[in-house]
Amino acid sequence: MSETIREKKENCGLFGIYGDKDAVGKTYLALHSLQHRGQESAGIASSDGEEIQLYSGMGTVRRVFRAGSTILSKLANPIAIGHVRYSTSGGSSAANSQPLLSEYSRGQVAIAHNGNLINAMLLRDEYEAYGSIFKSTSDTEIITHLLAKPSHVSKADPLGHVLKHLQGSYSLVFLFADYIDAARDPFGVRPLCIGRTVEGAYCVASETCAFDAIDAEFVREVEPGEIVRLDKKGLTSRFFVEPGTVTPAHCIFEHIYFAKQNSTIFGENVHEFRKKLGRQLAIEHPADADVVIPIPDSGISAALGFAERSRIPFDMGLVRSHYIGRTFISPEQSLRELAVNLKLQVIKEVVHGKRIAVVDDSIVRGTTTRGKIRALRQAGAREIHMRVSCPPIRHPCFYGVDFPTKEELLANNRDLDQIKEFLGVDSIGYISLQGQLGCATFPPDHYCTACWSGKYPIPVDIAVNKFAMEHYQMRMFDKQDD
Ligand code: SF4
């Protein structure tokens, strides 16, 4: 999925497995399955029970662990964790790639993180004032320093104690020499699931699609505020926050856009959820159209639901190229625009002379959507009715999703008529927030909806942005040429 087409970026994928002879190979396959969550860097840390080894680098899983190389066989150990990254805190550099491996008084630890720590900068300033030295500009590194603090090490449950110091969203996987701990923040913002292989090894992953990739079964989700341990005893659980004391705030955008269609997160299959959104959208904003076409790939499930409910034929009017990727980077603006066209092309025979309902999962800046609408008009579409399966996005995310600034958001300071005019469509309809939440499994107040409602479930009282920690101006050396 292309960088230029996707206006909102994923937020990292995690995997961990204990006690499997193919743990590293399975981690590699699982990371492939989670690749949609981040393509900037990838890494695997593994342990033989005594010592942790790490390999990470910039690019996709395939690029970092090059076919034919001996990297995976050198890492081969029965305990492993892996990470794919899209940077939501700290820049895109090899020093910020994960897992992050460190050594402290209790030995080695490798950490993989999905989410955003709102108070990372404050904690870092505090620790630097006492002489701590940081090797990256990622928010995740502060967790290592918290773990190493002598007054924390001496606690009965040092990790549980440390997690109470973190504010924001975090699903975390820790590899210690002879066990794995996996934890989820008390709000359960990002998903984290437990699986079991046919051989009986326990594993954890951001999404259940990773289990499908290694023929493992989905056991259950890690609960908000829970830490699960994978070790020679199997799976054990403890809570660092009393269950039921915090109202969850699952990121509903995971369901709408980020997660893969075959995944089950927050108690529900992603594809089925998106189809429900499409049906609800058709109830709220019916369209007089000859054909329903999706913006691929993430708009497909909602378009199916919309077509089903509207009793209008579904067809593929746009086709995506999965091969251009980020390899075509031309300095010429005109060629860059042509490259964007190449990523998503119109099937003229489907749209020519037709009234079409175009269904997308969301609109962020609107510039790429406008380009697609123009291409559909050029291909002869007679009328274009835009339907969107999430409400207008008006606020930024501070919990691990890299949206543009508020000023860049299409729906910020524009009413529906202005949005319709900007996109060049004949009509526009967004699902309502109430309608969207009505499609979900859990009660409406169990989801974060801040990017639509502006109501942030975790207080954001300090200025946070992705590059906030870059002012530390670390001198970093890439681990490999990019
Ligand atoms: S602000 Fe939006 S994208 Fe961010 S966690 Fe909340 S629902 Fe998800």
Image: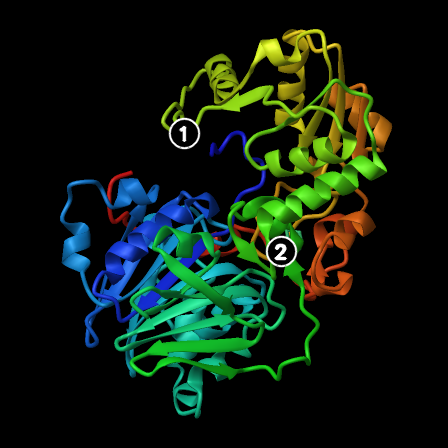
The amino acid beneath tag 1 is Gly
Residue 180 visible in rendering = yes
Q: Which badge, 2 or 1, is on the more N-terminal residue?
A: 1
Position in image of residue 187 (x %, y %): 63, 69
Instruction: From the viewer's perspective, tell me whether residue 292 is left or right of residue 59.
Output: right
Q: Which residue does the image show at 44% across and 91% down from the upper left?
A: 155
Task: State which quarter of the image contains the C terminus.
Answer: top left
- Does residue 7 lie above or below 107 as drawn? above
Q: Is residue 55 visible?
A: no
Alpha carbons under labels 2 and 1: distance apart: 27 Å
The residue identified by callout 1 is 325
Looking at the picture, which amino acid does disc 2 mark? Phe
Q: Is residue 105 left or right of residue 250?
A: left
Q: Which one is in front in this view, the residue at disc 2 or the one at disc 1?
A: 1
Q: Nearer the viewer, residue 322 or 354?
A: 354
Badge 1 residue CB within 8 Å of ligand 1: no
- Asked if residue 96 is positioned above or below residue 147 in the image, the reply reads above
Residue to which mark 2 is pinned = 398
**Residue drawn at x 44%, y 80% as measured from the top left:** 159
**Circle 2: is it few (<14), some (14-19), or many (20+) Cα within 10 Å?**
many
